[in-house]
């Protein structure tokens, strides 16, 4: 028996992944590969008899490049993303409570944080092999602004399955005015209970403003730290690549030297073998010369003896006459 939707199946098809897991993988896939990967999962679900799962997977739409980059940022930087979502909640609350000056300051900080995170998204996309155009990066910034301004947009981005970029609501204050103008009232006397309540409200407002500013400062610092760490990692990688290139060059030079030494060794071995052959041939010639000399000496000695015999015989014959 099958379970519903995204749950894992029983022993008969445990190798088939749940729908939610498949969708997580799909929306982490670059848009250029999305459709082919989706159809592979659809075919696998249909082959397993999971028609409803196949329908849900097939209903997934390929995200735009900007939406994919925003999803990539959410998945690759989970801790920063959570802080960013918390910051959006704090900002929406701040826009209901802070005065115009406070909103202006928060808006400036919000723009810096959005710009830093959008640059991170562009770097992540580039490292994954996809360069964001200027318009795509503006769409990423628009999505991040929407996440800060709109709780529904924040929920969509938190799910990591955006198909298109998000647009911030028009009613989100730009920083120059409060979200709602308070009705004008007559000033209360300083010693009245109403004045005391107003003082406490101002104190609470100032405290909330201070907390929001601290949260924004922490978020901005976290974004800058992440960007700095990314630059450091890129520098480390560049250094490692340079070291690898130098090691490859040294290895090539050493291999050439070894090859040259092996060639010289083979030549020296050939020279040694040739000299040994020549030495053996010279020794053989020397032995042959010694033998020839000995024979010549014997022959000369024998010839001399014969001469001596002949000479002695001649002297005896002369005396007898």
Image (spheres, rainbow, N blue to C red):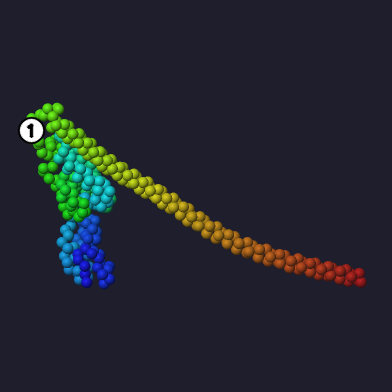
Q: Specify the quadrant that holds the C terminus.
A: bottom right
From the viewer's side, name the closer residue of 320 and 248: 248
Q: Is residue 272 visible?
A: yes
Q: Position of residue 237 (x, y in %)?
A: 35, 48
From the viewer's side, name the closer residue of 233 and 240: 233
Disc 1: CA contacts within 10 A as few (<14), some (14-19) or many (>=20): few
Instruction: Say which residue appears at 86% left-offset and 71% top-offset.
Output: 313
Q: Is residue 124 visible?
A: no
Q: Is residue 111 above or below residue 300?
A: above
Instruction: Say which residue appears at 8% left-offset and 32% top-offset.
Output: 185
Residue 278 sits in quarter:
bottom right
Q: Is residue 256 above or below residue 203?
A: below
Instruction: Say which residue appears at 17% left-offset and 63% top-offset.
Output: 56
| Residue at the far top in the pictured view | 190
Judging by the rendered image, the residue that carries numbered circle 1 is 184
**Left or right for 282, reference 263:** right
Residue 25 sits in quarter:
bottom left
From the viewer's side, name the closer residue of 261 and 55: 55
Q: Position of residue 250 (x, y in %)?
A: 44, 50
Instruction: Say which residue appears at 25% left-offset and 65% top-offset.
Output: 8
Q: Position of residue 20 (x, y in %)?
A: 22, 60
Q: Position of residue 2 (x, y in %)?
A: 21, 69
Q: Secondary structure at mark 1?
A: loop
Q: Specify the quadrant that holds the N terminus.
A: bottom left
Q: Is residue 45 above or below residue 193?
A: below
Total number of numbered discs in the rendering: 1
From the viewer's side, name the closer residue of 172 and 239: 172
């Amino acid at each position: 028996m099958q379970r519903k939707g995204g749950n894992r199946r029983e022993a008969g098809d445990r190798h088939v992944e749940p729908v939610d897991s498949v969708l997580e993988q799909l929306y982490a896939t670059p848009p250029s590969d999305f459709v082919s990967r989706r159809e592979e999962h659809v075919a696998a679900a249909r082959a397993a008899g999971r028609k409803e799962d196949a329908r849900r997977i097939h209903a997934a739409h390929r995200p735009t490049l900007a939406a994919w980059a925003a999803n990539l940022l959410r998945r690759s930087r989970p801790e920063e993303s959570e802080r960013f979502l918390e910051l959006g909640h704090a900002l929406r609350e701040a826009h209901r409570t802070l005065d115009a000056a406070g909103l202006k300051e928060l808006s400036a900080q919000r723009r810096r944080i959005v710009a830093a995170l959008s640059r991170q998204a562009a770097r992540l996309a580039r490292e994954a092999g996809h360069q964001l155009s200027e318009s795509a990066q503006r769409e990423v910034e628009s999505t991040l602004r929407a996440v800060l301004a709109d709780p529904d947009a924040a929920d969509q981005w938190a799910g990591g399955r955006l198909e298109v970029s998000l647009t911030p609501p028009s009613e989100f204050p730009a920083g120059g005015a409060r979200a709602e103008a308070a009705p004008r009232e007559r000033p209360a006397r300083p010693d009245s209970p109403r004045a005391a309540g107003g003082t406490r409200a101002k104190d609470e407002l100032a405290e909330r403003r201070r907390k929001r500013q601290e949260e924004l400062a922490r978020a901005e610092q976290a974004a800058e730290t992440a960007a700095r760490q990314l630059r450091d990692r890129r520098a480390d990688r560049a250094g490692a690549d340079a070291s690898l290139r130098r090691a490859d060059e040294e290895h090539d030079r050493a291999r050439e030297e070894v090859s040259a030494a092996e060639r010289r060794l083979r030549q020296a071995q050939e020279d040694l073998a040739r000299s040994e052959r020549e030495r053996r041939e010279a020794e053989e010639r020397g032995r042959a010369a010694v033998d020839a000399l000995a024979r010549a000496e014997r022959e000369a000695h024998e010839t001399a003896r014969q001469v001596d015999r002949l000479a002695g015989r001649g002297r005896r014959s002369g005396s007898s006459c």
